[in-house]
Image (cartoon, rainbow, N blue to C red):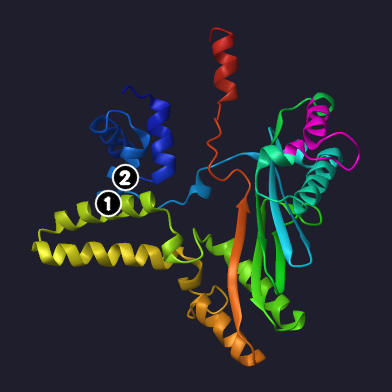
Amino acid sequence: MAYTATDVKNLRERTGAGMMDCKKAMDETGGDMEAAVDLLRAKGLAAVAKKSSRTAAEGLVGVAVSGTKGVAVEVNSETDFVAKNEQFQDFVRKTTEVALGASSDDVEALKAAAYPDGGTVEDKLTNNVATIGENQQVRRMKTVSVSSGVVVPYMHNAAAPMLGKIGVLVALESEAGADVLEPLGKQIAMHIAAAFPMALNADGLDAEMIARERKIAAEKAAESGKPADVQAKMVDGAVAKFAKDNALLSQVFVMDNKTPIAQVVEAAGKAAGTKIVLKDYVRFQLGEGIEKEVTDFAAEVAAAAGL
């Protein structure tokens, strides 16, 4: 697989490794970007990078809550300028409200749903593209609910009420009052926005991701030259730490930097005199998982001019 100087540059930006190390990694992996990232990490030359640090897309995330149900929706645009457009913001807000009434997290069904101003969400989206002059898309949605308790919304650095770039929902199942659950939910939501958990608990972590971490840990352990049984323990320890650091309930609460979230919730329940369960959560970060092409405008102009 061939690769370019731009690929090496992108690998360096993603991993923080040196240019020559990046070039060597691309040579060894035949230009496979993901394999090169893993190779650099296995050699200890790259820091663990979360998806959010290397993704880019514009638009807005909207969150809405009604009773014991909440939903988050991401709508993308090509530029941040459009995300500040009142017409676009109104569309994201109303589409999120429509999503509250949906029976599933099916984006295609959401686009086919009736829009408050007439027609469907898809019709309004098509009209926005024509009038604003920029491509837009409803990318994803997720709903959470509880039978009793609250769903607490939180928007980090809101661009407008319940619209922004990082939207969070926290679903707390309990008979405790809103005066107890809402402050707790907001604190946990702020933690989620900052700590970026990948699942509610270790069992929810993606199996392929765990397998990938195990492979990287095994390569690092092998380089230690220690006995096989010691290496096995090193690998198990590394995977366990990864799971602990990336599952919400086992993450250390950012507010005190010492208490696992599970214990924070348990203590709040004891104080309230009734059990509180952190049932589910949503964290939508704008552009998460989307690789956006970065172009060098000056270079494009120079090339077009034959310079």
Is label 1 in a helix, a strand or a loop? helix
Query: Front-most of 31 and 199?
Result: 199
Q: Position of residue 20 (x, y in %)?
A: 29, 36
Q: Which residue is mark 2?
A: 38
Q: Position of residue 73 (x, y in %)?
A: 70, 48
Is label 2 in a helix, a strand or a loop? helix
Residue 268 location, quadrant: bottom right
Residue 119 in the magenta stretch? The answer is yes
In the picture, which quadrant includes the N terminus? top left
Q: Can residue 183 be seen from the camera position used here? A: yes
- Residue 12's disc is none
Residue 29 location, quadrant: top left
**CB under 8 Å between callouts 2 and 1?**
yes
Residue 291 in the magenta stretch? The answer is no
What whole-number distance in Å separates the C-alpha atoms at marks 2 and 1?
7 Å
Query: Front-most of 291 and 305?
Result: 291
Residue drawn at 72 percent across, 72 percent down: 150
Q: Which residue is mark 1?
A: 216
Q: As displayed, is residue 120 above or below residue 101?
A: above
Position of 294 with respect to 20 (left or right) is right
Residue 304 location, quadrant: top right
Bounds of the magenta segment: 111-129
In this rendering, the count of numbered labels is 2
Amino acid type, callout 2: Asp
Amino acid type, callout 1: Ile
Q: As displayed, is residue 177 above or below residue 285?
A: below
Residue drawn at 27 percent across, 67 percent down: 237
Q: Position of residue 200 (x, y in %)?
A: 51, 65
